[in-house]
Amino acid sequence: MIANILTAKTKTIRSALSALLLLSLSAIAQVRPLDELPREQLRVFLKGHMGDWRLDTDQTKGRPAPLAHKPPPLDAHLIALPRPDTLHLGAMPLKDAIGQRRSRRAFSDAPLTLSELSFLLWCTQGITKIERDKEGQIVNEFRTVPSGGARHPFETYLLLNRVTSLIPGLYRYLPLDHALVLLRADDALEAKSVEACYDAAFVGQAAVVFVWAALPARTEWRYGPIAHRMIAIEAGHVAQNLALAVESLGAGCCPMLGYNQRKMDALIGVDGDEEFTIYLAPVGKVRHDTP
Ligand SMILES: Cc1cc2nc3c(=O)[nH]c(=O)nc-3n(C[C@H](O)[C@H](O)[C@H](O)COP(=O)(O)O)c2cc1C
């Protein structure tokens, strides 16, 4: 009798253990590193969903829409930026800016002015129109860049070294206020950003490094399985606006994916899961003595 009970218990424990093992194996199988996936599988990301993705999203399930911006920390002191409509920057003909654009990797010691930084932030994520409901709640933010469903999945972080009247440190742009919030004063950002970018020395010479973090949930809410393709495409819109805008200022930038994901996420202080670095660009006045 006792022997029977023991055998039954052992069986239960064994089957629980195998279920656990199966569960963890399937979890590993679901989240595999990209370099282990077959090419066909990787291309699915670019093709998107092969059927009708519109039927099964958080929006169709009636879940509330995530906000298109992260509010500043509660005790934050906001640094107002010069208003875009007061700036006389970016007068270079568009044709010249497009024709001259290059990826620039040689920056001078000259700082950017606060007005120039304000202009660049407006060109990349600035708000140009807001739609509100009857209660005054924001329902749509339109910005200087297109975004599927106006979901705007990015936050802009600045690794700031040399901008007039700002101390070096990590900042975040607040599009609704057209302001900055200082997240952390830091004199050692140059070295840290170089290290996070696989020792690319020119990143440390930038006056400021624009780091865009994606918050996929904002876009997933409406676009489900095609959200990720959409977010990657949209990062290109943002960086291209920056590239043309810096050109018009006699400055330059280099769009970059050459960074260590964990190190860059840690440097800008995001969790690496719900919010993570997707693209970055060091910006500075161009040094003309080198190619
Ligand atoms: C998605 C993307 C990622 C890039 N990543 C890097 C990078 O990590 N490091 C770098 O030095 N240049 C990077 N570049 C810049 C390219 O090397 C550059 O665009 C290319 O050499 C063509 O030069 P051009 O931009 O001056 O036309 C990247 C460009 C793109 C579009």
Image (spheres, rainbow, N blue to C red):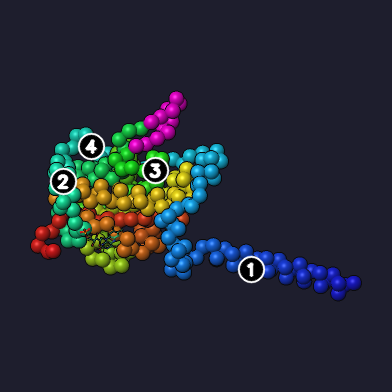
Say which element carries label 2.
helix
Q: CA distance from mark 2 to mark 3?
A: 27 Å
Q: Amino acid at mark 4?
A: Pro
Q: Residues within 10 Å of mark 4 (few under 14, many from 20)?
A: some
Q: Quadrant of residue 142?
A: top left
Ligand 1 contact, mark 4 (Cβ < 8 Å): no
x then y, percent, for residue 123: 25, 43
Which tag, 2 or 1, sits closer to the chain's start?
1
x then y, percent, for residue 83: 23, 36
The magenta segment is 131-142
**Does the magenta-highlighted stretch encompass residue 78?**
no
Q: CA distance from mark 3 to mark 1?
A: 40 Å
Q: Nearer the viewer, mark 2 or mark 1?
A: 2
Q: Nearer the viewer, mark 4 or mark 3?
A: 3
Q: Nearer the viewer, mark 4 or mark 2?
A: 2
Residue 63 visible: no
Q: Amino acid at mark 2?
A: Lys
Say which element carries label 4.
helix
Q: In the displayed structure, would residue 102 be above or below residue 57?
A: below
Viewer-proximal residue, 260 or 241?
Answer: 241
Residue found at the far front of this picture: 51
* Label annotation for residue 21: 1
Q: Nearer the viewer, mark 3 or mark 1?
A: 3
The residue located at (19%, 45%) in the rendering is 116
CB within 8 Å, label 1 to label 4: no
Q: Residues within 10 Å of mark 2 (few under 14, many from 20)?
A: few
- Residue 102 appears left or right of 222: left
Q: Amino acid at mark 3?
A: Gly
Q: Report the residue marked by disc 2.
A: 95
